[in-house]
Amino acid sequence: MNKMFNISEVSKLLDLIDPVTKKPQNHILRYWEKEFSQIKPKIINKRRYYSPKQIEIVKLIKFLLKNEQITIAGVKKLMNLKLNQLDDSNKFSLKEKYYKLILKDKSKSLLEKINRIRNYGKKNSS
């Protein structure tokens, strides 16, 4: 069974955090849920839970809105064109840019972990 994530966990994963209060901006996800029919969290005991597949859809929507600065209407059109199935092979596609961003973030995270391990080894080798 896939792990389900609550709305606050998803907000944190997507870095939808209020810069002042440091609280998750769950209202953004609730708004996107109303705007995009592709976002369908499970409602259990009046709480929203997102599957990993749903999180990927939300990440793609966030990327198109924030990074590519496409309007909500434009993203709706792209999502209705089945963007997830269309442009995997096109080198200059939006999805290619999205995957590049994900790889860049994962690489950065791995480098940080490697450096922490490296620095930890230096401290203990005295």
Image (cartoon, grey):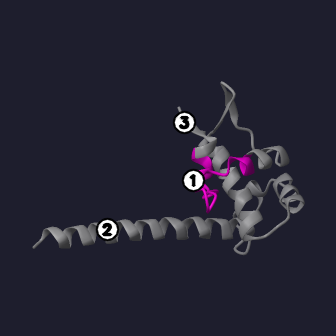
> Do tag 3 and tag 2 residues touch (Cβ < 8 Å)?
no
Q: Amino acid at mark 1?
A: Leu
Q: Residues within 10 Å of mark 2 (few under 14, many from 20)?
A: few
| Rendered residue at 60%/56% (across/down) | 21
Residue on which disc 1 sits: 13
Q: Residues within 10 Å of mark 3 (few under 14, many from 20)?
A: few
Would residue 49 be found to the left or right of residue 111 on screen? right
How many callouts does the rendering have? 3
Q: Is residue 87 above or below residue 27?
A: below
Looking at marks 1 and 3 on the same chain, the residue that comes earlier in the sequence is marked by: 3
Mark in the foreground, 3 or 2: 2
Looking at marks 3 and 2 on the same chain, the residue that comes earlier in the sequence is marked by: 3
Q: Which mark is residue 116?
A: 2
Q: Amino acid at mark 2?
A: Arg
Q: Residues within 10 Å of mark 1 (few under 14, many from 20)?
A: some
Rounded to the nearest whole Å, what is the CA distance between mark 2 and mark 1? 22 Å
Disc 1 secondary structure class: helix
Q: Is residue 41 above or below residue 20?
A: above
Mark in the foreground, 1 or 3: 1
Residue on which disc 3 sits: 2
> Where does the C terminus fall, quadrant-wise?
bottom left
Q: Which residues are magenta?
A: 9-29
Disc 3 secondary structure class: loop
Rounded to the nearest whole Å, what is the CA distance between mark 3 and mark 2? 30 Å
The image position of residue 63, as x and y in percent, is 70, 63
